[in-house]
Amino acid sequence: MKGLDFFRIICEAHAPSGREDWLYSIIKDNFKEFGDTTITKLNNMYIHKKGITSNKLMIMSHVDEVFLMVKEISEDGFIKFEGFGVDAKSLVSQEVIIHGKEDISGIVALKYNYNDKDKSKVSMKNLYIETGFNKEKLSGIVKLGDYITLDRKMIYLLNNNVSCKSIDNRASIFAMYVCAEELKNVNSDLDIYFVCSCQEEVGHRGAKMVSYDIKPDIGIALDVTFDSGILGDNNRENKLGKGPVICIGPNIHAKIRNRLIETADKYNIPYQVEVEPGNTGTDAWDIQTSVGGIATILVSIPIKYMHTSVEVVNIEDIRNTGRLLARLIQDLKESELEGLFCF
């Protein structure tokens, strides 16, 4: 599939919250044929594809990934760390990169307490990173507060599935790429903004900033959601390989959601639905209430093992997400907007 190398490269690359710029040169190189690129002062990036009218549709995918930070360098040369968004149990025996003055490889080791009756107990307190350096050498390269990210190469599994770190949310960036590719020779009625937002993992901050910057008429948040299969979230009905997941709930504009479902049915694009009666926990939550209110929908890609180094996604789900959004944009006319926005 065209662009699959791009997906692999962005998944294997590193861009923790606050350092999304580490990824932007790669994204810019791959999106440059689709529109003009802007990077804002606080690390949002968007690609603008000019439409026929002045009405705006924004598709947003966050760039940042979950991460660790250096908390202490022990006398023995081990790195203690704080984590954000990562379950301590998933870190045991993982490979990491410490982003100091230069990048250093390390492994996460578990300090096993033989006197602890609960042998299954794992916390950040008994994990440390081994680099092989002593404290003197390490202190010349690494300082407190340096970022640490998971290090993992993409693995190709059966049935068109792949596994890697940072599929949350690089899968959505790839879906935007598929969408942009599908619209390459389409003159859409609406101005299209493909947005790579910053700091979603620490509070959806980029979504607020860029919504005020662009002021779109329609906002589409792209993210991942939990698979409900074996070892998944039993409270959901999302399955890998069954298509993008369209969210239903008060965070979602009902008429635009229905328009998206009609588009999926029209073009025989598989999709699933997910009910979220409260906070969706995504950029959609902040887009909706920005600039006096933006008509917002959320489309998610199901994945397994979220916020680990072995997240799993189905490539066809990504492709169908991009295709669905492209068909919506292709068919959407300015004359429809007033009717869509009326309750």
Image (cartoon, grey):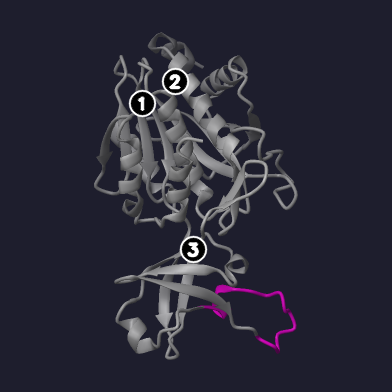
Horizontally, residue 250 falls left or right of residue 118, namely left
Q: Which mark is first along the chain, 3 or 1? A: 3
Q: Which residues are magenta?
A: 113-128
- Tell me if mark 2 has few (under 14), some (14-19) or many (20+) residues whose alpha carbon lies within 10 angstroms of its own: many
Q: Tell me the residue that label 1 is attached to.
A: 192
Q: Which mark is first along the chain, 1 or 2? A: 1
Amino acid at the residue labelled 1: Ile
Residue 48, magenta (yes or no): no
Residue 336 visible to an observer of this rendering: yes
Residue for point 67% across, 33% down:
242
Q: Tell me the residue that label 3 is attached to.
A: 150
| Residue 78 position within the rendered picture, expressed as x and y whole percent measured from the top left | 46, 83
Amino acid at the residue labelled 3: Leu
Compare residues 269 and 291 and report the one nearer the observer.
269
Horizontally, residue 203 falls left or right of residue 18, namely right
Where 125 sits versus 256, above or below? Answer: below
- Tell me if mark 3 has few (under 14), some (14-19) or many (20+) residues whose alpha carbon lies within 10 angstroms of its own: many
Q: CA distance from mark 2 to mark 1?
A: 8 Å
Q: CA distance from mark 1 to mark 3?
A: 33 Å
Compare residues 220 and 176 and report the one nearer the observer.
176
| Residue 176 position within the rendered picture, expressed as x and y whole percent measured from the top left | 44, 34
Residue 120, magenta (yes or no): yes
| Residue 57 position within the rendered picture, expressed as x and y whole percent measured from the top left | 39, 25
- Provide the secondary structure element on which disc 3 rests: strand
Residue 251 visible to an observer of this rendering: no
Residue 329's disc is 2
Q: Closer to the camera: disc 1 or disc 3?
A: 3
**CB contact under 8 Å: marks 2 and 1:** yes
Residue extending farthest to the top is: 335
Amino acid at the residue labelled 2: Ile
Predominant SS of the magenta segment: loop
